[in-house]
């Protein structure tokens, strides 16, 4: 990690240490690129996945709709981002579990596109922790996830960058993803502020955030909801959404 990267990361971690908000987000610079990173205490915060309206069965599709759903529980959305690839009707491409109910099965085979660029992985939320788990390991271990979303490719596997990422790649998109700590207590959600390569994005998690496992969520349609920094990205309807709920003010 360069000294500049370390200073950016240190400033972010200090900002996130304050008790005032459930989730705080901040800027991180790496490899000449700008990113926004949100750190979540997975052991303490109400971290969930959202896909459909429980009353209508229709896709929620937007941060505003998720917030409206939570208001019925006297809670509010304090952080969210898109959380995995989806079909045109917003159905998840791979495994999707919400509140203990499996709505789409695990996909372990290679295939076209970024999702099928093995190894891919699963973001699994359990009691007191959240983990990124490589798909083949997930299939063997069968962890008891309350919520889970599968996406791909993996960005970092056991501290190593995905082997297919090239430093000189010319494929650039606005990208977002998640990395988790070894003990599952902390999840870092990141989105690039401009188009970046997989290599630049993966090394953000490996070299700056220091996550042993990290998973790509998507590119081009990537969006962030972070009211603490006055950010509410709009765009096309989404599929799976990951977010943190907190009591209404």
Image: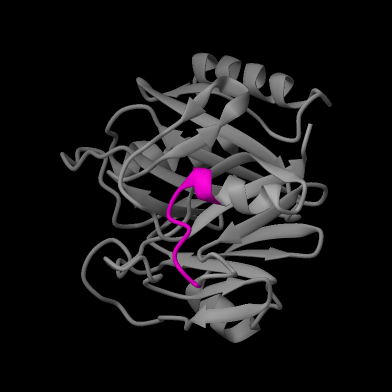
**Residue 115 among magenta residues:** no
Left or right: 171, with 61 as reference point = left
* Camera-side residue of 217 and 213: 217
Left or right: 108, with 74 as reference point = left
Q: Measuring from the top left, give residue 246's x and y in whole percent.
A: 76, 42
Residue interval drawn in magenta: 57-65
Question: Which quarter shows the C terminus?
Answer: top right
Q: Measuring from the top left, give residue 8's x and y in whole percent.
A: 56, 17
Q: Which color scheme did the rendering employ for the protein?
A: one colour
| The image quarter in which residue 23 lies | top right
* Camera-side residue of 134 and 173: 173
- Furthest toward the left, the residue is 170
Total numbered circles: 0
Q: Measuring from the top left, give residue 52's x and y in whole percent.
A: 51, 66
Residue 9 seen from this side: no
Residue 172, above or below 161: above
State the residue at coordinates (47%, 55%). 83
Residue 31 seen from this side: yes
State the residue at coordinates (50%, 79%). 136
Q: Measuring from the top left, give residue 11's x and y in whole percent.
A: 65, 16
* Most frequent secondary structure within the magenta stretch: loop
* Camera-side residue of 155 and 81: 81
State the residue at coordinates (43%, 55%). 61
| The image quarter in which residue 142 lies | bottom right
State the residue at coordinates (29%, 57%). 164
């Amino acid at each position: 990690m360069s000294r500049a990267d370390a200073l950016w990361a240190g400033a972010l971690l200090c900002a996130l240490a304050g008790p005032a908000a459930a989730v705080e987000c901040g800027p991180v610079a790496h490899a000449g690129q700008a990113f926004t990173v949100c750190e979540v205490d997975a052991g303490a915060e109400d971290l969930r996945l959202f896909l459909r309206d429980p009353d209508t069965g229709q896709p929620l599709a937007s941060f505003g709709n998720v917030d409206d759903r939570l208001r019925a529980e006297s809670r509010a959305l304090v952080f969210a981002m898109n959380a995995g690839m989806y079909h045109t009707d917003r159905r998840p491409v791979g495994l999707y579990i919400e509140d203990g109910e499996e709505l789409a099965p695990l996909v372990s085979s290679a295939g076209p596109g970024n999702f099928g660029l093995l190894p891919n992985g699963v973001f699994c939320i359990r009691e007191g922790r959240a983990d990124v788990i490589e798909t083949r390991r997930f299939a063997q271990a069968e962890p008891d996830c309350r919520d889970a979303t599968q996406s791909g490719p993996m960005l970092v596997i056991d501290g190593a960058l995905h082997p297919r990422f090239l430093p000189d790649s010319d494929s650039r998109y606005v990208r977002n993803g998640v990395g988790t700590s070894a003990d599952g207590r902390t999840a870092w959600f990141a989105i690039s502020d401009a188009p970046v390569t997989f290599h630049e994005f993966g090394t953000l998690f490996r070299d700056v955030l220091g996550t042993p496992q990290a998973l790509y969520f998507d590119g081009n349609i990537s969006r962030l909801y972070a009211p603490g920094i006055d950010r509410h990205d709009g765009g096309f309807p989404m599929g799976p959404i990951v977010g943190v709920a907190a009591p209404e003010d």
